[in-house]
Image: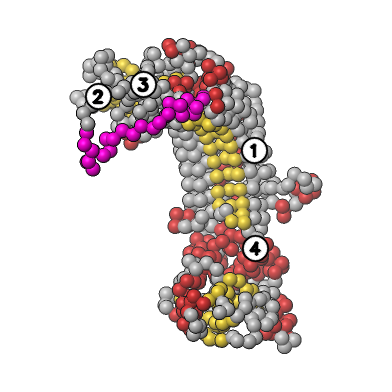
Amino acid sequence: MADPDSPASPQLSSSASRNVSPFHSLALGTRLVHRSTSQRCTLRYVGTIPPTLGQWWGVEWDDPLRGKHSGTYVDPASGEAKQYFTCRLEGAGTFVRPDEPGKPPKFARGVSFLKALRAKYAPDLRPTQIQEQDKVQYTRKNLADIEIETPNMDGVIRRVGRLDKLREVGLGGWKGGNAVTQDSDKEDALDVGCAFDESSGETVGDIARICPNIRLLDLSRSLLPRWEDVAFICRELRQLNTLILHFNRFEPYCSEDARVLQGAFDKVTDLRLDGTLIGWSEILFLSKYFPSLETLQIGSNALDRLSPPGDVQNLLDPPHQAFAHLRQLNLSNNNLGCWSDIYQALMDLPMLERLYLSDNRIGRIAVPPNLCAGFPALQHITLNDNPVNEWSDLEALDDCVRWAPQHEDAAAKVDQTLRGLRSLTFAIGAGSVEHETSSPNEPRGTRNDKDKVLAQSSLERLKDLQPGDIRPSIIARLPRLEMLNGSPISSSERKDAERWYIGHVQRQLPEADDEQRTQYWRRYARLVQEHGAPSSLPNAVKTTSTLGSKLLELRIQASSSVPIAHTPHTTPTSIRHSAMRVLRSTPIRQLRSKLAKQLKISGGAAAIGSVWAMLAEAAHPDEAAAEAGNGRGDEQERIVFELDDDARQLSWYQLSSGDSIIVVIDSP
């Protein structure tokens, strides 16, 4: 079985000559690409495998599905197993015969950076050889064989191929295709395998002279074996600020590389390392070579935990502040499941503003012991596709974030009202809610039956919510939230969401007192104090599956003007009244046709200018009660809004039986 923590395979000593031309002699750790399949691998073993004859290569494939074992050979006669090499990913290894002299090679070892750069951006086109050929009668069958010539293409290539003008370069796993160089085979994969090719006369300083203005460099899926090789390239690109290294397989960092890495990445602000299988500890070791880094992307790296910086700082010489300028960190598509581990590892990053944690295994978020201890600058978190299933987890996440504008005084910075998440991306779907809610750390059998009813899992409450209820529920629970799923939260939307939250809590627990409600809906008391409690709310209705339970009884009116919140709400003249029962799942587009038919509108649905909803419940319940006591109950202020999305269902707008629909008819 592969052991990712096992000692690294033997490597050559660090030297400039090894990095200048590493592909004239094979060494363990050499990166190869299979010519016929373009599959990449790393050489892990060279030698014999008794009782078989001849030489073998042991390779670890980047794609583990191509492997057959983890470096172990089992003698078919004796059944004895022997481990020849180890793999980072279990089952990614195979044994293959090496290339034979005189035969077409099965593997390519890549080319130098400049050779790959010229092949893609400034290819040397061979002179067109004009051969006399018999005239061919083209038909539909051979129409694709027609060769199309572009006038003055050589001039275009010369103008575009100014390597000193290049700002963005992409050499990520690029295959030469029809571009042919004079010293390489047509079918050779022009992947970058080293910084310089000494045999071709390349030397240190050539990259800086030929292409000094590169700002963005993509070397994804390259054949560079070590960080040292990347450093030889980047240290000559003094304008480089974005480095993309997705799906490379670098040998583990070692102290011998420090001399070359020092100063090579000083101006890099954006580093992307998806699918490189680099551990967090190694990332922290490398952080001192990226002093200006602001964006770090390390998704799809099979990370299952993050070591707190303190665990690694003791090994660093000299100690340093890891990622002092980091603003964005993307850890998506890993195996992170322990929030406390994430919190301890990242809480001290002084400038971290955006944290992406999509596609992980975070299911439980605990409140940290000290609410003001970490995340001094964090504003946004993405949590898509995680098994977060308790509302308390989102509320705890909000507690973990401390954000205060720098211009505020010290007293304001410790004000708890300033803490909280400002932006959240959290798409709730089947993958986010259908998970087991129990936790091995949660004691069992400690609640009585009454508490179990009051403390029903948030997963169950979530299932009871209509799709349109989820957004206001999140908004009401996170008081400092300003952006949800990319949409800004206006002050009016927050006010409506918090009022809906109060009513929802009372409908869920109609017989509980405020203390019990606040125990499981912790913002309830605060919001009641701010907005007031509704004067009367119907008891929670048992969920049924009958058709009648899915119908809304609505009052409908036809009007010549848009309704307003204050009385008389609609125009007092030329109004037709009616009532109708309609399914909650009715799309607004279909509702328009029903309204036109019910109100007998001439011209049908096409004559309807807009459709508005006016809630039966007053906008200010406490004021409404006073108005009712004065005999002016009909003069209450109402909540009025337009049903403006024809693709939405009626349930999305949160209407209840007794509410009104106002149909505004276009003037003829």
SS at circle 4 = helix
* Label 3 sits on residue: 127
Could you tell me residue 593's position as x and y percent? 46, 77
Q: What type is the residue that disc 3 sits on?
A: Pro
Is 12 a magenta residue?
no
Q: Residue at x 57, y 17 (%)?
A: 259
In this rendering, position of residue 379 left or right of residue 192: right
Magenta extent: 136-163
SS at circle 3 = loop
Is 156 a magenta residue?
yes
Q: Earlier in the sequence, mark 2 or mark 1?
A: 2
Q: Are marks 4 and 3 in contact (CB under 8 Å)?
A: no
Q: Which image quadrant: the C terminus?
A: bottom right
Give the Cα separation between the discs numbered 4 and 2: 78 Å
Q: What type is the residue that disc 4 sits on?
A: Arg
Nearer to the camera, 172 or 315: 172
Which of label 1 and label 3 is nearer to you? 3
* Label 1 sits on residue: 349
Which of label 2 and label 3 is nearer to you? 2
Q: Earlier in the sequence, mark 4 or mark 2?
A: 2
Give the Cα separation between the discs numbered 1 and 3: 58 Å
